[in-house]
């Protein structure tokens, strides 16, 4: 049994709203967010699986938290990679619940986390990269695991993606925070043709050191790759080889990793 707490805290570290519960908690914020506000999910147990909803427009994310989590409310340029309904207005429903055992070991997309952010989040899965185009939120690594697969344009939500700023050595890693067993990788490459280029080939490197070469084609459809079930804690995509077409702008809309939590 875990005690879960949700708090809304302002830039001066003052608690505006708080609620706590045994294994489950909800919090209603009846004011508009201000710049510098953050949502804190706190627990008396570390390393647990939790359903966490930072905003009703994002939906609940199935996450693994290693410590207390702070989610910073996006403003300005950072906001445009989220639904315009998210964090807007003066009525917000926040929710957290400790996961049941059947949920923990269910087969699903292990990479999905619409609550992912930059930095050391204590909240997994977590995506990070060695480059994000111009440092803009609409091209951040987190966009590739937010669950939005719209890939026929680029820019503001729902067309956010991971952009590589024309870097030949671009790489992105998805960390799971604990051991999982994966057997399928799905890539949605951005397909805003002719603005976009596309990758002919990429490499996956798993945390166990094994690598896999992926062959791709020009398509709006997902690229699906089955693998032998393997126990991993992270996977990296790199060695991205674009086609000979004129555009210098390939990008990744979504990366899914299917499997289950290792027992």
Image (cartoon, rainbow, N blue to C red):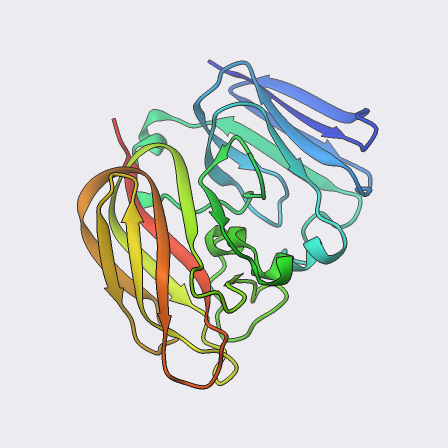
Could you say where residue 226 lies in the image, as x and y percent from the top left? 20, 56
Could you say where residue 32 lies in the image, as x and y percent from the top left? 82, 43
Q: Quadrant of residue 204?
A: bottom left
Does 130 sit left or right of 217 as displayed? right
> Looking at the image, which residue is at 54% across and 66% down?
165
Count the numbered circles shown.
0
Could you say where residue 81 lies in the image, as x and y percent from the top left? 63, 58
The answer to whether residue 148 is above or below residue 9 is: below
Q: Nearer the viewer, residue 172 or 10?
A: 172
Does 66 sit left or right of 228 as displayed? right
Q: Nearer the viewer, residue 92 or 207?
A: 207
Q: Quadrant of the C terminus?
A: top left
Q: Nearer the viewer, residue 112 or 251?
A: 251
The answer to whether residue 162 is above or below residue 174 is: below
Does 209 sit left or right of 27 as displayed? left
> Looking at the image, which residue is at 50% across and 74% down?
249
Could you say where residue 243 lies in the image, as x and y percent from the top left? 36, 79
Q: Nearer the viewer, residue 91 or 144?
A: 144
> Looking at the image, which residue is at 56% across and 55% down?
140
> Looking at the image, which residue is at 30% across and 32% down?
105
């Amino acid at each position: 049994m875990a005690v879960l707490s949700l708090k809304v805290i302002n830039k001066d570290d003052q608690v505006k709203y708080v609620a706590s519960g045994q294994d489950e908690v909800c919090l209603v914020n009846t004011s508009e967010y201000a710049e510098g506000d953050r949502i804190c999910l706190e627990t008396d147990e570390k390393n647990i699986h939790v359903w966490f909803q930072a905003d009703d427009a994002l939906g609940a994310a199935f996450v693994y938290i290693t410590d207390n989590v702070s989610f910073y409310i996006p403003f300005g340029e950072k906001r445009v990679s989220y639904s315009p309904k998210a964090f807007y207005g003066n009525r917000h429903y926040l929710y957290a619940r400790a996961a049941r055992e059947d949920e923990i070991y269910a087969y699903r997309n292990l990479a999905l986390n619409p609550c992912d952010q930059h930095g050391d989040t204590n909240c997994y899965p977590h995506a990070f990269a060695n480059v994000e185009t111009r440092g803009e939120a609409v091209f951040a690594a987190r966009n590739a695991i937010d669950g939005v697969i719209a890939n026929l344009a680029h820019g503001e939500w729902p067309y956010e993606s991971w952009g590589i700023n024309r870097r030949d050595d671009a790489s992105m890693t998805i960390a799971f925070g604990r051991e999982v067993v994966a057997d399928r990788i799905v890539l949605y490459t951005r397909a805003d043709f002719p603005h976009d280029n596309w990758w002919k080939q990429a490499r996956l490197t798993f945390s166990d050191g094994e690598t896999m070469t992926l062959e791709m084609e020009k398509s709006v459809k997902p690229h699906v790759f089955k693998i032998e079930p393997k126990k991993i804690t992270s996977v990296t995509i790199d060695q991205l080889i674009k086609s000979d077409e004129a555009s210098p702008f390939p990008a990744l809309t979504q990366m899914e990793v299917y499997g289950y939590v290792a027992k």
